[in-house]
Amino acid sequence: MVSIVESHHASRECDVLIVGAGASGLMCAIHAGRRGLKARVLEKGPKPGLKILVSGGGRCNFTNLWADPEGHYLSENQHFCISAMRRYPVSEFIDMVNAHGIAYHEKKLGQLFCDHSA
């Protein structure tokens, strides 16, 4: 079960507390729910997923074919991106998009965008 709440309701019991209802936060909540965990998502903005709607000019630039763990990412932990991207590679994300029947196309430099609105 996943619920998105405002901060003044944050005291309700849950297994996982996720701060931010953007793309990453919602993805975390989905995976927590699939594992049978009760997730609560806190969002300070006016609407969950709002930034997803405007990414890529409303077409949702959801990944890049050429994103790789060895890329040039900045982090206090220089191994974080490598570890995260090896555990969840771009190909798995694209498989999930395909499994949901979401039509998309490639633009320049491997950028993938939804064919329809975000």
Image: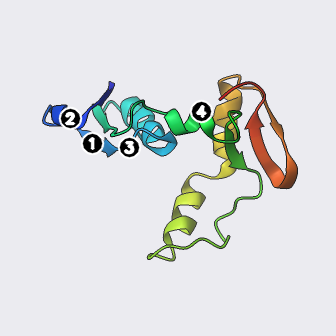
Identify which amino acid the numbered label 4 is placed on.
Leu
- Kind of residue at disc 1: Leu
Q: Are marks 4 and 2 in contact (CB under 8 Å)?
A: no
Q: How many marks?
A: 4
Which element type, helix, strand or loop, lies under badge 3? loop
Q: Nearer the viewer, residue 74 or 100?
A: 74
The span from disc 1 to disc 2 (Cα, nearest Å) is 7 Å
Colour logic: rainbow
Q: CA distance from mark 4 to mark 2?
A: 28 Å
- Residue 24's x, y, as percent? 48, 45
Farthest residue in the right direction? Answer: 108
Asked if the residue under mark 2 is in contact with the one under mark 1, i.e. CB atoms within 8 Å, the reply is yes
Name the quadrant of the N terminus. top left
* Label annotation for residue 54: none
Q: Residue at x 52, y 60 (%)?
A: 84
> Looking at the picture, does residue 30 appear above or below residue 72?
above
Q: CA distance from mark 3 to mark 4?
A: 15 Å
Residue type at mark 2 is: Cys
Determine whether the residue tagged by mark 4 lies in a helix, strand or loop.
helix
Identify residue for label 3: 20
Determine crowd level at label 1: few under 14, some 14-19, many 20+ residues with C-alpha closer than 10 A. Answer: some
Q: Residues within 10 Å of mark 2 (few under 14, many from 20)?
A: some
Distance from the alpha carbon under mark 2 to that under mark 3: 16 Å
The first of marks 1 and 4 along the sequence is: 1
Viewed as shown, does residue 13 lie left or right of 3? left
Q: Are there few (<14), some (14-19), or many (20+) residues within 10 Å of tag 4? A: some
- The residue shown at (39%, 32%) is 46
